[in-house]
Image (cartoon, coloured by chain):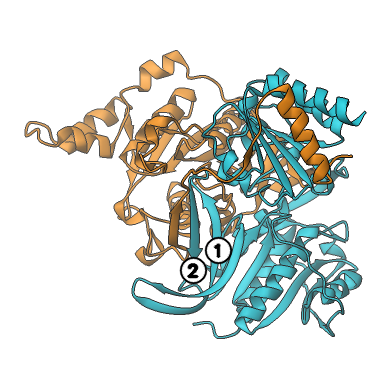
Chain colours: A cyan, B orange
Amino acid sequence: MNENKLVWVFIEQRDGKPADVSFELLSKGRKLAESLNGELQAVLIGHNMQAVAEETFHYGVTDVLLADHPDLHHYNTLPYSRIMSELVDRYQPRIVLFGGTFIGRDLAPRVASHTRSGLTADCTDLQISDVTYLRKDYSQLLLQIRPAFGGNIIATIICPDSPVQMATVREGVMEKIPLAQPVAGRITPIYYEPDAADHLVRIIARHHEESKVNLKAAPIIVAGGYGMGNWQNFQILHELARVIGGEVAGTRAAVDAGYIDHVRQVGQTGVTVRPKLYIACGISGAIQHRAGMSESNKIIAINADPDAPIFGVCHYGIVGDVMEVIPKLIDAYKHKLK
Amino acid sequence: MSYHSIVMVKQVPDTANISGQVMKPDGTVNRSKLPTIFNPEDKVALELALQFRDRFGGTVRVMTMGPLKASDLLRECLYMGADEAFLISDRKFAGADTLATSYVLAEALRKLGNYDIIFAGRQAIDGDTAQVGPQTAEKLGLPQITYAEAILKAEGSTITVKRKVDNGFEVLEGTLPLLITVVKDAATPRPFRAKRVMAYKNAHTLLELEKMTEGNSLLYVDQLKEEYVSKGLFIPTLTADDLDVDLNRCGLGGSPTKVHKIESVVLGGSAHETIPATKDGMYALIDKLMEDHIFG
């Protein structure tokens, strides 16, 4: 069994800029390392990454394994997964965490496959605990907690016999908590030798647009679900958001139905938000959606079905037809505040 | 140049449309009662493969790992236009996580061989992991292009693919053979072709033929199989014996991730404040939100 107590976080960068989710994972990773009485380390791959490497010291990283090379400037599956797999093979960390981003979800399964490690996607919580599984005792396993099966169950996954335990976590799920003082960490350079196979897939064009939507920063979010009924009805949410000064969001079902763009999806497989006010309209409240919004400061739920699970997490519940309630809410707001 | 594709498809419980009939009295879902469907993104992957064949020529084979019931899915693939279908099925494969699943799929692909592109949906709606595609590619030592939105070009052994990334897209050029996972917007699956439905509605997998002979002493599986093969209606089944697999890496035993605990989500009430859906109710709500320092 794996006796070392290393917790690793893959630090993701795009155009040299570190992703928020990596610092969120470092914050969680630090807690896991404390529970294990172990050490938090980071793996960073890119070019001119010195400053980013040093930034991780503010999150308690004691050692950054840094592969820095001009060919590694942009994420590319084959070289990145080769470097990461070799590092995992060599150091056998106890835990490896990846962001649940396009990059993390492309990279993590490849590394897990190569190293034959257990990997759990889109965890909403991670804990360390002793576990008895099939009458055998295991100490200090990583509990990987996630909703499953369309949100009808919450599953706790373990990797009892896997030396390395891997998980991906979506952006915003864990809280980013820098230390008051950075630790005195070190940077370990990792030698990268280019390989012909690294170029089997080549990037020939990239189009990046800075996201115009920042749901995580919005103080008020007006969100709609499949219960809005159709695209036309959904538009009333934009009206409400405009009047009260909020951003519009949707559930996965609303995104799948084409009511709203996927960048505005709140939930386990979308964005996790903690606004001052979250207004859930025509949202039944599947656990995956609740995983992305239940920590909002105040939640208003509007739904025609009094038994909808969304009423289980809201502070103010309104049972009624959203298309009738929202105009009244808009009128009341205008009357009281304008 | 023409290309040979294999599409990996999966039959999944329809977790998106849970009706009252599958709810147990305690408020949890009876998973065995959920209807099964063609995993939506796998269907898009098949469509993209068929469009690719329409443009450049070649063949499209489909394969799925699953129980007897997954035979329905393979017939649907034939209705849409797949040239050949394969069922990978064995009790020894049951209970597999993504690592053990990708191991068997990779061995099946090795067995089928002769492919330029392997297509798969980005993820299946029952687990949403998006892991099986990349894990299969890794095991075969193939490059991968995930989140593909369109195949822009194919020339010789190079294809050009547009893929989604965080906040934008990339255009990648890949050397074949490789594996592509496909997002929902990549294509609109074609309806079943009536002619093909007529032609293949009686296509059966070996498992189905075995079932037909059960309790019927006049029917022999081998005979029946021969008959179906001669009519072009036999869907081959690959079992553990047909594949060169290490059983320690298959099924539940070969899966490093284990389910430690499952808690059914029981829908219950909570101590929220009920606001009447009236004008007065809305006025009172605004007042409360002002007291909460959210408005005003």
Q: Residue at x 91, y 71 (%)?
A: A51
Q: Say which amino acid is labelled 1.
A: Gln
Q: Please tell me whether residue A29 is drawn above or below residue B57 in the rendered image.
A: below
**Placement of A310 over or under A337, stated as above or below:** below
Who comes first in sequence, dot 2 or dot 1? 1
The residue to which callout 1 is attached is A144
Q: Which mark is residue A106?
A: none
Quadrant occupied by the C terminus of chain A: top right
Q: Residue at left 48%, top 19%?
A: B192
Q: Can residue A32 be seen? A: yes
- Camera-side residue: B98 or B15? B15
Q: In this view, does A178 lie above or below A334?
A: below
Residue sitting nearer the eye, B195 or B192: B192
**Other residues around mark 2 within 10 Å, as few (<14) / some (14–19) / many (≥20):** many
Residue A204 x %, y %: 83, 46
Protein chain holding label 2: A
Q: In this view, does A230 lie to the left or right of B295?
A: left
Q: Which amino acid does label 2 sit on?
A: Cys
Q: Mark 2 points at which residue?
A: A159
Mark 2 residue element: loop
Residue at far left of view: B217
* C-beta proximity under 8 Å, tags 2 and 1: yes
Q: Which chain is disc 1 placed on?
A: A
Residue A243, percent from left and from top: 86, 29
Coordinates of residue B191 in the picture (x, y in percent): 52, 19
